[in-house]
Amino acid sequence: MTVGCSSNSSWSRACTPDIDELGDFTHQSKSAGPAPLPANSLPRVWPRFRTIYGAEVPAMIPLPKRYAVLVLSSTLLIPGCSSPTTAPIVTPPPNPALVTAVKQVLNGYLASRGAAEHLSSLSMAVSYSAQSPTITITTGTTTYGGTTPITPTSLYQIGSNTKAFTAVAILQLEAAGKLSIDAPIGMYLPQYPKYANLTLRRLLNMTSGLQSYDNLLSWETAYAQNPTLYVPADSLIRTVYPSIEFPPGSKYFYSNTGYLIAQEVVAALSDSKSFPAEMSRIIASVGLKNTFYTSNLYAPDIASRVVAGYYEQDDAGLQPLRGKDVTGYSLSWAQGAGSMVSTPTDLIMWARALYTGTTLLPPKQRAELESFVSTTTGQPITKVDAENSAGFGLGVAQRYDADLGTFWFYQGETLGFRAAHLFFPDSGIVFAVFANSRPVGTESQLPQYFSQLYATIKKYAPTSS
């Protein structure tokens, strides 16, 4: 798992080593099939965290609590205004041409790539603005070769999209005066004396110098031998402790280890003294109804909603799992680095709250969240551009493309899932795409369709009256 970023204008793999892919897509010709990934494409975020797509408009579309509305069919119900004499507010239905066009792309991908990627479903959601209802498009079944169709509320593992939640928890603690992201972590976690001088900023922006525990063959072998075993975060951290691979701040290297250390800080300093409790609090604060965190196995009522996820990667130590549905395995290996499950609709709500909302973080901490380092050099940059086309902040990432401009992007992976969201500030469009398999990188061609999907979404954008 090497790290690197391409500075060309193509949609290449955004930087972050394995479980969580920031990007891995190229422009698709209007007349030809997907272009092959460039040889110098951006490195994979981390090897096991991702998720991708959705269909049909749900009967109830969840919106952030601050909008105080419930959408039932095409009628908006305002709490406190339920009098039968109150005229309903009618929301225009989604453009059927958009739904048809996007579903055609998804169906085509599933038909052409399903067997090669051991993929049975794609779930997608599209949002044109914070005020408009989210449109969902789904295709496929909950299991490979099965007959039960997925729905917009089917759950997928979202991998490293979890990282932004962990970063927000840290920044909220800083806003409360309980820590500084630039203070030595030895002030908060004395149990790791060799890491005492590292800072939370470096742990979260991937410049700490720490190896990612899931890159180790020893971890892969141990997990494959007992994939349902719960492993505490401290044990995972100590698989790489006390090693520091390079001087902190000298370069960028995607490591999940830093996020487990951040998780330990949250547990130590939060009022709840519980990282899962803090994740649940943040999830609820945004009004997410179909997003859940676990440090091990999900409860049956949640687990039953998660579609099958298939591992098809080539990690040497994980080969006993190849071809299997890994959904029922422990997510203790991921935790604060990537163990959440969600839906595309919820991930869009989270993206809007994260990038444009005003309630998650005060201005100082929002600026810190969005303080980038170049994924090429590891050095601070003020913006992404043609020279530094990928920047990583604190659990968030931004890309620059000559044709598409500047946009927020994250793609997460777990052993059996891929999950991506893209937010374009200039147009206000957000879309999220989930897929239920984790193929070898060269077999994963879905990111090559992101530009086509964005162009299709823009083509059918509602016109202002």
Image (tube, rainbow, N blue to C red):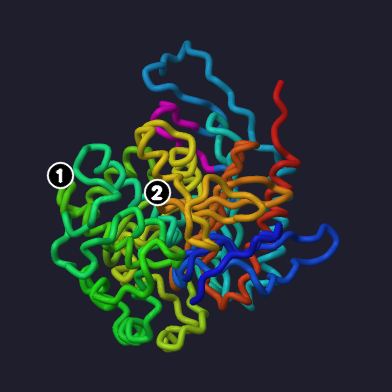
234 versus 75 height, above or below: below
Q: CA distance from mark 1 to mark 2?
A: 25 Å
Q: Is residue 184 above or below residue 71?
A: below
Residue at x-position 29% and y-position 63%: 260
How many residues crowd mark 2 within 10 Å: few (<14), some (14–19), many (20+)? some
- Front-lying residue, 206 or 455: 206
Residue drawn at 22 percent across, 50 percent down? 277
Residue 229, image x, y percentages: 25, 77
User: From the viewer's perspective, is 284 left or right of 41?
Assistant: left
Asked whether residue 61 is drawn in magenta, I would say: yes
The answer to whether residue 149 is seen in the rendering is: no
Callout 1 secondary element: loop
**In which image quadrant can residue 31 be found?**
bottom right
Q: Which mark is residue 107?
A: none
Q: What's the mark number on residue 290?
A: 2
Query: Which residue is at 63% across, 76% downward?
Result: 443
Q: Position of residue 302 (x, y in %)?
A: 34, 58
Residue 410 pos. (x, y %): 51, 55
Disc nearer the start of the sequence (1/2): 1
Q: Residue at x 45, y 30 (%)?
A: 70
In this rendering, would 4 be left or right of 199?
right
Residue 304, by quadrant, is bottom left
From the image, which quarter does the C terminus lie in? top right
Residue 263 place in picture, x, y as percent: 26, 58
Amino acid at the residue labelled 1 = Asp
Q: Are marks 1 and 2 in contact (CB under 8 Å)?
A: no
Q: Residues within 10 Å of mark 1 (few under 14, many from 20)?
A: few
Q: Is residue 289 magenta?
A: no
**On residue 271, which mark appears?**
1
The residue stretch that appears in magenta: 58-71
Quarter of the image where one finds residue 155: bottom left
Q: Amino acid at mark 2?
A: Asn
